[in-house]
Every structure is written in structure tokens, then in C-alpha cells.
């Protein structure tokens, strides 16, 4: 075998590699043996649809590019006399793929921002229940306003972990007397809009509930509102998704979605504590 044939075989081998890669990617996308956790939120369906759309478009371009790359390698690869044809600049093609890429990119961005706005920038429905979330190293605190529907005042100098006052509830404010606080467990009634006000006591944390397709940084000094509606009862997980210190890996909470009756009982039991 001379050198030229050897290069040609190598080019064909690489072409086959690209085709196998394209095929494996397409199969992985269609069969998806490893995929997202179950979906438990009304708004999350949009997030999943957007992700599938983005992956679908990017995947189509990826597969097409690799099939073409393989075809050109197969046909023109190697070191045959006259096989290397140099050309550059095809203005029509360059304008086409630049415009197509720009339209797809901006279009996906616009659609994504609409979905983002639905959870983050619009007001929750009037019947939404508000829960305050406060991250701390290394736990999640939750607070329900109690029967009066009002959160009592908090003050940083009142924070006292040894007394279980993790968020610094000020007992001088009567609105706080019926506030109900929990640590590392939060319950919500199913099919009811929930508004969260996300805060942090110390450093950056990130409130991440995979089943809600929902992740929001907790920023010291800010109360960030977001809202969602959980659609299925069960026990799920909240994780901290921002590296926040040595025990970041331990910072997780249980997220319980309950029927209305079960939720009322649960909250009453917490209130009694
Ligand atoms: Cu954290």
C-alpha cells in the first residue's frame, strides 16, 4: 500500500467515525435513557418544551453537519492527485447560514425570556400563598405568615441559632407571633399557586427544585419573588445549587406537595410546636 492509499483509508475511517457519532447522538436524543426528573409544576412544562426545542434544533444542525463532514471526507479525503480543491468565499452561503443561525438564536432567546417572565416577572395569581425562604450556611429556612397573612419583622441582631431563631424573628412585632417557621422541610398544597420570597442570611445560595424546573439564587439583602403551582402530591428534593461553603453538599431540604387537608393538618402541627 502506498502512502496516498493509506491517507485515503484514514479519511474514510474518520468519515465513518463522524457518521457513528451523528447516529449515536440522534439515538440518544430520541430514546433518552437518561433524562430529566419527573415534572411536578404547571410552569415547568414550558421549560421542558423549550429545552426539547433547543436540543432538537441544535441536534438537527449537529447531525446534519457531521453527516456532511463525513461525506466530504469520504469523497475527497486522502492524498489523491487532483482531489484537493481549494476555494473560499461563497457569499450566498455565508449570508444564508449567518441569517439562519441569528434567527434561530434570537428566536429561542425571545421564547425563553417569555417563559422566564411567566415565573419571575409577572405577579402571581391573587389567591397565591406566600412562603418565605431563607438560605443559611448550611440549611434552608421556611416561613409561613400564619392566620393573619402577614410576616412579622425580622432583624439580623435577633438571629440566634441556639434558640432556633434562624431568621431573626423580632418578638416586638405582633404580626410575627403567628408566623410558622420550619427548617429543611417545606410543604405546599397541590394545585395552588405558591409565591416564594427567596432570601439569604449570609452568602449566595441557590434554591433549586429539580421537579419544578426551578432554580433561583438567594442573594443577601434581597427578597426575590417567584411563583409556581405544584401539580402532583409527593415528596421531592430541594438542593442548594451554589457552592456556598464547606458543607454545601449537605444543604438540602424536603419539598412536600400535599392535598389541602393534609397540608392544613401539617401546618397546624408545625404551628403548635
Ligand atoms: Cu448554599
Image: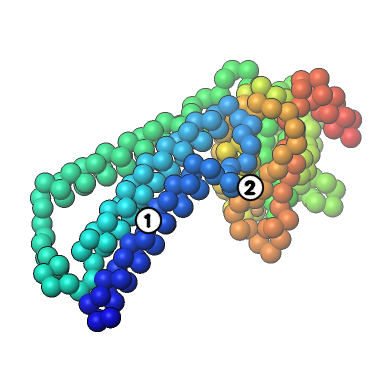
Which residue occupies 36% across, 38% down? 108
From the viewer's perspective, is 132 left or right of 215? right
Q: Quadrant of residue 243?
A: bottom right
Q: Quadrant of residue 10?
A: bottom left
Q: Which residue is mark 2?
A: 200
Q: CA distance from mark 2 to mark 1?
A: 49 Å
Q: Decide which of 4, 136 is in the foreground and name it.
A: 4
Residue 265 picture location, percent across and down:
85, 24
Which residue occupies 47% across, 39% down? 51
Which residue occupies 57% across, 38% down? 213
From the viewer's perspective, is 272 left or right of 83? right
Q: Is mark 2 within 8 Å of ligand 1?
A: no
Name the mark nearer the viewer: 2 or 1: 1
Residue 266 picture location, percent across and down:
83, 28
Vertical placement of residue 59 versus 53, above or below = below
Q: Decide which of 212, 22 is in the foreground and name it.
A: 22
Residue 91 picture location, percent across and down:
10, 50
Give neighbour class at mark 2: few <14, some 14-19, many 20+ (Cα, 10 Å): many
Callout 1: SS: helix
Say whether residue 38 is visible. yes
In the rendered structure, find residue 199 and report the number of the disc placed on it. Answer: none
Q: Decide which of 56, 48 is in the foreground and name it.
A: 56
Amino acid at each position: 500500500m502506498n502512502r496516498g492509499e493509506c491517507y485515503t483509508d484514514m479519511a474514510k475511517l474518520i468519515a465513518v467515525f463522524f457518521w457513528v457519532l451523528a447516529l449515536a447522538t440522534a439515538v440518544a436524543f430520541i430514546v433518552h435513557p437518561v433524562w430529566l426528573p419527573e415534572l411536578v409544576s404547571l410552569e415547568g412544562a414550558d421549560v421542558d418544551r423549550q429545552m426539547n426545542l433547543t436540543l432538537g434544533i441544535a441536534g438537527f444542525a449537529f447531525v446534519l453537519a457531521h453527516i456532511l463532514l463525513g461525506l466530504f471526507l469520504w469523497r475527497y479525503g486522502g492524498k489523491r492527485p487532483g482531489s484537493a480543491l481549494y476555494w473560499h468565499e461563497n457569499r450566498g452561503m455565508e449570508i444564508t447560514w449567518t441569517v439562519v443561525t441569528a434567527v434561530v438564536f434570537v428566536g429561542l432567546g425571545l421564547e425563553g425570556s417569555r417563559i422566564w417572565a411567566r415565573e419571575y416577572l409577572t405577579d402571581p395569581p391573587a389567591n397565591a400563598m406566600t412562603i418565605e425562604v431563607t438560605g443559611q450556611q448550611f440549611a434552608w429556612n421556611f416561613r409561613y405568615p400564619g392566620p393573619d397573612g402577614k410576616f412579622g419583622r425580622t432583624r439580623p441582631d435577633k438571629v440566634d441559632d441556639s434558640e432556633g431563631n434562624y431568621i431573626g424573628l423580632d418578638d416586638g412585632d405582633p404580626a410575627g407571633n403567628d408566623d410558622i417557621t420550619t427548617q429543611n422541610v417545606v410543604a405546599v398544597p397541590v394545585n395552588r399557586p405558591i409565591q416564594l420570597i427567596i432570601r439569604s442570611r449570609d452568602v449566595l445560595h441557590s434554591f433549586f427544585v429539580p421537579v419544578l424546573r426551578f432554580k433561583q439564587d438567594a442573594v443577601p439583602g434581597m427578597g426575590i419573588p417567584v411563583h409556581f403551582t405544584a401539580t402532583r402530591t409527593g415528596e421531592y428534593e430541594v438542593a442548594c445549587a451554589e457552592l456556598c461553603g464547606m458543607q454545601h453538599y449537605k444543604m438540602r431540604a424536603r419539598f412536600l406537595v400535599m392535598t389541602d387537608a393534609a397540608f392544613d393538618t401539617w401546618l397546624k402541627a408545625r404551628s403548635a410546636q
